[in-house]
Image: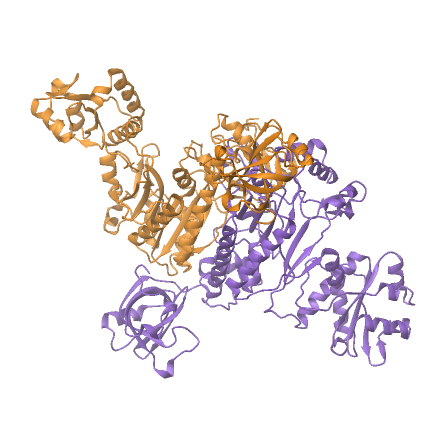
Chain colours: A purple, B orange
Amino acid sequence: MFGRSYECGKISERQIGEQVTLKGWVQRRRDLGGVIFIDLRDRTGIVQIVFDSETSAEALAIAEKIRNEYVLDIQGTVIARDESTVNENIETGKIEIQVNEVTILSEAKTPPFPIEDTTEVSEDIRLKYRYMDLRRPVMYETFKMRSDITKTVRDYLDEEGFLDVETPILTKSTPEGARDYLVPSRVHGGEFYALPQSPQIFKQLLMVSGFDRYYQIARCFRDEDLRADRQPEFTQIDIEASFMSQEDIMAMAEEMLKRVMKRVKGVEITDAFPRITYDEAMSRFGSDKPDTRFGMELVDVSEQVKGSGFKVFAGAVESGGQVKLINVKNGGTTYSRKDIDALTEFAAIYGAKGLAWMKVEADGLKGPIAKFFSEEEQNGLISSAEAEAGDLLLFVADKKSVVADALGALRLKLGKDLGLIDENKFNFLWVTDWPLLEYDEDAKRYFAAHHPFTMPVRDDLPLLNDEPEKVRAQAYDIVLNGYELGGGSIRIFERDIQEKMFEVLGFTPEEAKEQFGFLLDAFEYGTPPHGGIALGLDRMVMLLSGRTNLRDTIAFPKTASASDLLMDAPSEVSSGQLEELHLAIRQTAKK
Amino acid sequence: MFGRSYECGKISERQIGEQVTLKGWVQRRRDLGGVIFIDLRDRTGIVQIVFDSETSAEALAIAEKIRNEYVLDIQGTVIARDESTVNENIETGKIEIQVNEVTILSEAKTPPFPIEDTTEVSEDIRLKYRYMDLRRPVMYETFKMRSDITKTVRDYLDEEGFLDVETPILTKSTPEGARDYLVPSRVHGGEFYALPQSPQIFKQLLMVSGFDRYYQIARCFRDEDLRADRQPEFTQIDIEASFMSQEDIMAMAEEMLKRVMKRVKGVEITDAFPRITYDEAMSRFGSDKPDTRFGMELVDVSEQVKGSGFKVFAGAVESGGQVKLINVKNGGTTYSRKDIDALTEFAAIYGAKGLAWMKVEADGLKGPIAKFFSEEEQNGLISSAEAEAGDLLLFVADKKSVVADALGALRLKLGKDLGLIDENKFNFLWVTDWPLLEYDEDAKRYFAAHHPFTMPVRDDLPLLNDEPEKVRAQAYDIVLNGYELGGGSIRIFERDIQEKMFEVLGFTPEEAKEQFGFLLDAFEYGTPPHGGIALGLDRMVMLLSGRTNLRDTIAFPKTASASDLLMDAPSEVSSGQLEELHLAIRQTAKK
């Protein structure tokens, strides 16, 4: 232990009688009429140290001066606590340290906020004083888990023959994908490097090199407007392998995640992760990343209502849309009109023009629109919804994507509101058979649903020309509790297919060559079939540690405006620095 | 093995009779009158596959088309080779695969250079076709070793309770140190992030946070003009610990390096690494990173020659300088006047105004300057140099730093030229007791020899005001075979000492506060004594793999002008990208 006998949290009655040296922070100091008790804290926990009549006058005098967050070096004897003061909740609860000697290693001003797990302080203050925020035990535990996760991942991948290879951070800007962070070159005036959005191309080139199995816990960068679950720099567990099929890669990733679950959560998962196709996920859950910890699945009643007297439903189906419902068990009695109005407003955020509803009673459906449905139609709906008296049925009638978005979001909200989600569950789910392309109405062109290097299903290749939206990808996502944990695909490894893909994405042959010529060339020198997966580490830590904020999983995160409040970055630089980089700041700069 | 029975290099006579599926690249194809032999390669090695009269006509027809670097999927039977064709040098040398079926997974154009360990091709071509260059077995072996080194380091540090914590890549520009790479902010127009030169401040803040033990295999960046052993981005094994003394940290790093040596070199080092002070290293080897694999140490003969008739020597000593020699064993007979002239020119590069020499013969010293020394003086020099007849003594008389630089460089050159260095030796060496500060004659101020956060030796603190050059640092370097492998120090953890240090470095209090205020503030909230070390991973891989070029240790390195020849980075970006970043390019940009 290098100068310490033990860490604070690791002393128990087994050490009674021992002379020990301990170092740590003062969590709390109580002076009970000449006897001073101090809770001494380090990353492993807390131990109680006592200055009493046995303590030297010198040490007692020092103890008088000690305040919270002082750093102490103490020597003393481990003794048993009085029965009445035993704390069964902590490892050190049966003992205390009778101090012989104490040295104050560092004094401390009053902390800007108390060092406790539950803090009411604003996040900006926490970020400005991040070094204090990280003292809170819950923060340390999160980073301990993060370190344990990456260690487990590395151990597994190393065993499986994956090589840890570092790829460049200073690389080339490419137009496809999110906005790049740029780095001006001093040597090549007017030119820029870009920070990588992922090591995608490098890992594929390593496969061309015959490296066979690659991994990296890789920093990635995107200059996008930030949401709560986005950071300008984020970390992914990045994996690529040659000669492995989609099944092989999914099996490998699954085994890796099972090891992580066992190591950091103590959860042994023996069954294979469930699988669902993209189409089925959208149909049953209205989401490509379903939270399967609860039911309330979407029920398609289009066929049942298309001939009904309710024109909103019939019309939606007639014009190619859908009518779907979710069944809120027992919601018929608990949800008031006002509650339902609030849900309607919520659904509107996702594009739903309305939210129809009917309550299930012993003698059929009730509510303003119930009258439009015959008894037979009502019974059909009740049966499809597997509903019972007391339930509430919520309907969205619209085009397919709006129905999925609105009911999918409503399902999640209701699942949370109604406490249907078992927070102790970890539901992994594979989502497969993704579409290769997505059509963007604004840009009026196709974009790669995964990325431009994803291999189409071979049987679908002939559709690329005329019905590209029908082409399926050899792609797979891994979902945990309704969050996309990661995704992967088998890659294109043939020049002609890759060129075709660029063409479908709207590249001219010249643009494709200029941007990705080196990759197209590489494919002509003997390239193995290959594929891989990338998992978001920050999100994985967030989900497994039970945090709700991605920033709590990153030691020194940035705010929503991409600022580092601790170090004050970004910041102005000297004119000399700008001159060396051949740069000038435009008048458009805000300050 | 996911679709393969074995990797190519791992089949031996134990598999004779088995039906196997193999995948790999064609290293070589020979057609011996209807029987086709192919060396199939993957990262593990080569196996011979045979198409002969037993092979189907279909497979034979395919085999006819196969060329070098094609990727094949073959099925066949493992059979014993004829005695006469056994190759004892490789694992697979006793067997071959009789092919039943073959599929060409990928065709290949003629490679730009042969895929062999020894290549004559220019480095620019290798870098442009890096994906082919990395197919050479020696390259793969280097990256396998790199991955093994980091795995060993991680395993050790994890066992010792060090947490792997990631620190930001987008951080703040600081004026002290090398030139920063800058990243313009889009959100905060006119402001910049900087890429970190090291995680130094972050790891110290983690100590303030009570994380206790931190490590990271961290990417670092310096925008400096490149030499053969520099890259714009490089990787260091970065370690920091609280409550550990200099001895503790050195012991920990030493144990880590011993584990690495055992794992990747099979070398068990049981003795403690030798130690030398900075002063002794400079005095005995003329270097702060001595190569101790051979002797030829510098001998100080200032006292012996200061009264001699040779005015160059006497004068140098009189004016406060030194006279030192190195003894080139047997050099007296092998070095001609012309050879010695060449050495003189070499010494001049390091500032030596001349290189005096004398040869040792049975009856005393010989050479143009021998006459200036009495018999007694000559015997004294011979005795100090531990010289024998046939040796050559080389002298430099100058101020101390020039003597060290010139003779230190000369020693290294002669060690190499004369084959005195055992390339199989791995001589680790600790260099301790560094000066805290270095005076820069050009800038006319002191710079931190290590960095501004290094703790002075406490006893030397009073010297900081008046004789700062005499203050020693609690710093230590680890040297391997004459290269600085890494360095570390105990850090300042008290605000007043840190402020004093900034003052000595020429910061005004305002500048110190503006640049490092957050760190000074942090020290006031209870900071543990702490220290650490950082080791250059790229250089470690270079030295342990026996490569001579740092670029061979980096998968996708940059050239001396910081270009990526494969991806063509840096490159121009669109005017839209520049506008978003509020930047304009100056006319000074070269193109």
Q: Residue at x 40, y 54 (%)?
A: B157
The answer to whether residue A328 is above or below residue B504 is below
Residue at image position (27%, 72%) is A60
The residue lying toward the viewer, choosing from A508 and B130, is: B130
Residue depicted at x 30% and y 23% = B346
In which quadrant will I find the C terminus of chain B? top right
Return the x and y of residue A194 as percentages of the image width and height: 57, 40
Residue B136 visible in the snapshot: yes
Residue A586 visible in the snapshot: no
User: Which residue is at the far bottom?
Assistant: A84
Residue B391 vertical placement versus A122 (above, below) = above
How far across and down, in percent of the image, does residue B135 sit?
53, 35
Q: How many numbered tags mark residues here?
A: 0
Near-viewer residue (B256 or A191): B256
- Residue A553, image x and y in percent? 53, 58
The answer to which quarter of the image holds residue B330 is top left
For residue B17, side relative to residue A515 (left or right): left
Q: Is residue B163 above or below residue B69?
A: below
Which quadrant of the figure has residue B343? top left
Spot occupied by residue A49 in the image (x, y as percentages of width and height): 33, 72
- In the image, A390 versus A194, the foreground residue is A390
